[in-house]
Image (tube, rainbow, N blue to C red):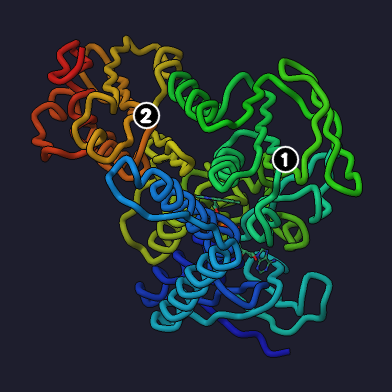
């Protein structure tokens, strides 16, 4: 078999791999991108970010229509056509997927369908499936592992695809279930709880830790729990799943802890996290360290084997599409000889697109105190925002965590309508090492939701203009 030579071979075409490949193409590197699926885009485009947000958009429109009367609009009875909702979601995914393929072509990336396996420091084989025959032999100065992650299973509730579902399965449901129990209240769990509750399912969400979205600021999580309660979601924190037994009609669930009890549900979604794909890809043939399945890397995403990198969900950095993409770009720019900086993980925005949305960047109040900062905080509720009132979305608030001596903004935490858009400004403030005073002196247009960020900055000094 003749060996084909490239500058870079990337295994996996998620937002880490495909974005890295496009950038490598732009930089003139001969690039091969191996993907086992017949399409590119990975979890994010096909089973994650994009399809979930498409369904959440439907839920938002539906909620708005149900409130039409408040706005003096007569819309008659609103009906949900789940099949068309699913079709629209797939249409969005397919269109974006064609776009990704087109971009890869345009930038001269050779996309190879097959299972990629490392066979030595500079050698990669392409196989016809994980257990299939070898089809091609590639060599490259740089190999990038971008194989991503898959849903994590638990012994007490193994996926069966019918009653006990992963996020992949629940995206493809052909009906709105009468009842749904979600195990795990991270971003994926709360997003699906929100979607299906909005479409009428009876939803229970179970979390072993004391609150929803455990990585977010405590006050934000409390506000979300309140909003979920108002929606009619049964929130059970400090609660563990003991067992989930499929019955003919649904699943019998036993819970222990604070929310102990027996519940029956049509389906269960297990959303307790993801597992990196680091097996079956030949890592034993190189000097790569693996811990809990994650490929260990340095600040440049390089593994213990020089020239072999790991980006995205397969390494231990945050499981987010934008982190994967930033890492992909950084790696290929570095090998192309550009001046690069390590990815600033502390400035990564975290967004959860449930209703109400949650978004944050930087340190929570607790984390900031743990790191020894003298902390000041300022909070502004959307209830006091003109724009929020106009839109009828007054739940939630903006909270700023700042450092006392130098006035630096350490973190911004938002729960409420469009939080995931509003957080971009906060990301820029953190990147620039901005202060509360600078935020106060930044003119914010009126009337906008973004004024609430401005007001929260004033509130750090107890001087919010429209509240308190
Ligand atoms: P992946 O996207 O997982 O891609 C890996 C690719 O590698 C896949 O295409 C896979 O087929 C391929 N592959 C694996 N092994 C091989 C092999 N040996 N050979 C060839 N190909 C292989 N993140 C956000 O930032 N925002 C969100 O809103 C968001 N929502 C999400 C919602 C859900 C339901 C889920 C599950 C995840 C969500 N995420 C979100 C997380 C996001 O999807 C991941 O962080 C992101 O996809 C990771 O990118 P990646 O490139 O590392 O891997």
Q: Of label 2 and label 1, which has the lower sequence position?
A: 1
Ligand 1: image quarter: bottom right
The secondary element bearing badge 2 is classed as loop
Q: Which residue is at 64% across, 43% downward?
A: 201
Residue hosting label 1:
292
The quadrant holding residue 445 is top left
Q: Which mark is residue 395?
A: 2
Q: Which mark is residue 16?
A: none
The secondary element bearing badge 1 is classed as loop
In this rendering, is residue 427 above or below 43?
above
> Crowdedness of circle 1 by 10 Å Cα count: few (<14), some, many (20+)?
few
The front one of 91 and 436 is 91
Q: Which residue is at 61% across, 74% downward?
A: 34
- Residue 398 visible in the shown view: yes
Across and down, in percent, residue 346 comes to 40, 34
Q: CA distance from mark 2 to mark 1?
A: 39 Å
Q: Along the horizontal axis of the image, is 164 left or right of 429?
A: right
In this rendering, is residue 124 above or below 82?
below
């Amino acid at each position: 078999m003749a060996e084909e030579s490239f500058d870079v071979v990337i295994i996996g075409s998620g937002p880490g791999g495909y974005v890295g490949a496009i950038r490598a193409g732009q930089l003139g590197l001969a690039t091969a991108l191996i993907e086992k699926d017949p399409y590119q885009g990975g979890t994010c485009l096909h089973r994650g970010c994009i399809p979930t947000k498409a369904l959440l958009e439907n839920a938002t429109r539906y909620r708005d229509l149900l409130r039409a009367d408040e706005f003096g609009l007569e819309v008659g009875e609103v009906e949900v056509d789940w099949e068309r909702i699913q079709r629209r979601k797939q249409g969005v995914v397919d269109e974006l997927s064609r776009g990704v393929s087109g971009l890869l072509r345009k930038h001269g990336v050779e996309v190879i369908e097959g299972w990629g396996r490392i066979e030595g420091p500079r050698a990669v084989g392409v196989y016809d499936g994980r257990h299939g025959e070898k089809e091609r032999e590639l060599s490259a100065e740089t190999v990038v592992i971008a194989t991503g992650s898959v849903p994590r299973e638990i012994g007490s509730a193994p996926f069966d695809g019918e009653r006990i579902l992963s996020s992949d399965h629940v995206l493809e449901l052909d009906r709105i279930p009468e009842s749904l129990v979600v195990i795990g209240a991270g971003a994926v769990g709360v997003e699906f709880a929100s979607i299906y509750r909005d479409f009428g399912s009876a939803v229970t969400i179970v979390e072993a830790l004391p609150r929803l979205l455990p990585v977010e600021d405590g006050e934000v999580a409390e506000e979300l729990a309140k909003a979920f309660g108002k929606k009619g979601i049964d929130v059970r924190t400090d609660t563990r799943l003991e067992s989930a037994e499929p019955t003919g009609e649904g699943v019998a669930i036993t819970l222990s802890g604070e929310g102990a009890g027996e519940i029956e549900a049509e389906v269960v979604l297990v959303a307790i996290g993801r597992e990196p794909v680091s097996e079956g890809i030949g890592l034993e043939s190189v000097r790569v360290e693996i811990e809990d399945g994650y490929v260990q890397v340095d600040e440049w995403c390089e593994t213990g084997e020089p020239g072999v990198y790991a980006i995205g969900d397969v390494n231990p950095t945050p499981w987010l599409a934008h982190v994967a993409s930033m890492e992909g770009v950084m790696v290929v720019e570095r090998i192309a000889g550009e001046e690069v900086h390590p990815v600033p993980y502390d400035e990564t925005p975290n967004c959860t697109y449930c209703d109400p949305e949650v978004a944050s960047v930087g340190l929570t109040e607790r984390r900031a105190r743990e790191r020894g900062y003298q902390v000041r905080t300022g909070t502004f509720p959307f209830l006091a925002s003109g724009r929020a009132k106009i839109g009828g979305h007054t739940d939630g608030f903006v909270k700023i965590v700042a450092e006392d001596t130098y006035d630096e903004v350490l973190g911004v935490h938002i729960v409420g309508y469009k939080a995931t858009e509003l957080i971009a400004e906060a990301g820029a403030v953190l990147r620039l090492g901005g202060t509360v005073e600078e935020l106060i002196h930044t003119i914010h247009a009126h009337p906008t939701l973004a004024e609430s960020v401005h007001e929260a900055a004033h509130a750090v000094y107890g001087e919010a203009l429209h509240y308190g």
